[in-house]
Amino acid sequence: MVDSNDLLKIIDDKMSSLSKGQKRIANFLKEHYDDAVYLTASRLGEIAGVSESTVVRFANELGFDGYPRLQEALKELVKNELTATQRMKLSFDRIARADKDILQSVLESDAARITNTLCNIEPKDFDEAVERIISAKRVFVVGGRSSSALSQFLAFYLNLMRDNVINASTGTVTDTFEHIFRIEEDDLLIGISFPRYSYKTVKAVEYAYSRGAKTIAITDSRQSPLVNGATISLIASSDMLSFIDSLVAPLSLINALLVAISIKRKGYITDGLDKLEDLWEKYKVYSSGIKKKYL
């Protein structure tokens, strides 16, 4: 499989050996890859003035197993390279072409991403991740930028299920490394990041891996920079909605992890929750939810 991060370089390297028609396709992709990402092979051929079969041969020439694989690489390139403004424009154009209202378009897209995640995730990787989280001496969770919401959610519930959970997501890169610099072989670091990938999270996963600790990457593809430093990679579909990251499928995956852990640690967790309920009641953590009306 060709690395999508090197797509533009591959096109440059192959340029001299391409036919005239293929060179027109190559030049269009280099200048307008953000527009090309959702084009069919037929439509791309029309724009470049070549046949659909020429587009397919062009994809093969670059090392892809067909045009759909080239499209996947284009999508990865777009997710990684575009600015927030460019992402917003591209997603608005896509929604306009779909000819659906915003609510329907967004919810249908999110449902499709959950389905895609279920189809593509490896059950053995999921099961191993659950066991690693349960058995680790300490669990560090890192998620930068928009993924910090996911890391906080995961760390909050893990803290109810086991001891020694450290949310290392807050603050700067320096703050994160001050949390994890003593990480050891018996520890686990969970890194969560989606395009545009957080530099802090990528480096935290790499550092933990270099220290011999186990690492779990929750990210969007095998081409994600988190995968290089991951013991286990859990792939959840993500896409851009305006400049906003769609994190519905990753959150659903994290929910599944938490449910699996809670089932395996049922007795321990139940005992802890009983004690917590007493504390919550004593210190009025939760409202009763019932408002009395007085005449």
Image (cartoon, rainbow, N blue to C red):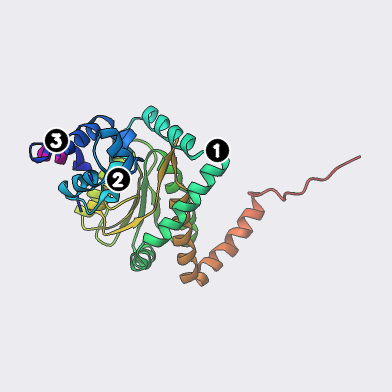
Magenta highlight on residue 13: yes
Q: Amino acid at mark 3?
A: Lys
Name the quarter where the C terminus is drawn: top right
Tags 3 and 2 in contact by the CB under 8 Å rule? no
Q: Quadrant of residue 103?
A: top right
Q: Position of residue 230 (x, y in %)?
A: 26, 55
**Residue at screen point 61% across, 56% down:** 279
Q: Which residues are magenta?
A: 10-14
List the residue tagged with mark 3.
20
**Residue at 48% across, 34% down:** 96
Residue occupying the point 19% across, 53% down: 210
Please, what is the three-letter code of the amino acid marked with disc 1? Answer: Ile
Report the Cα–Cα distance between label 1 and label 3.
41 Å
Mark 1 surroundings: few (<14), some (14-19) or many (≥20) residues within 10 A = few
Where 9 falls versus 167 (above or below)? above
Of tags 1 and 3, the one toward the viewer is: 3
Q: Counting other residues with Cα less than 10 Å from the Cα at mark 2, is it few (<14), some (14-19), or many (20 or more)?
A: many
According to the image, label 2 marks what residue?
71
| Snapshot quadrant of residue 214 | bottom left
Q: Which residue is mark 1?
A: 102
- Res 126 → quadrant: bottom left
Identify which residue, 86 or 170, lies in the foreground.
86
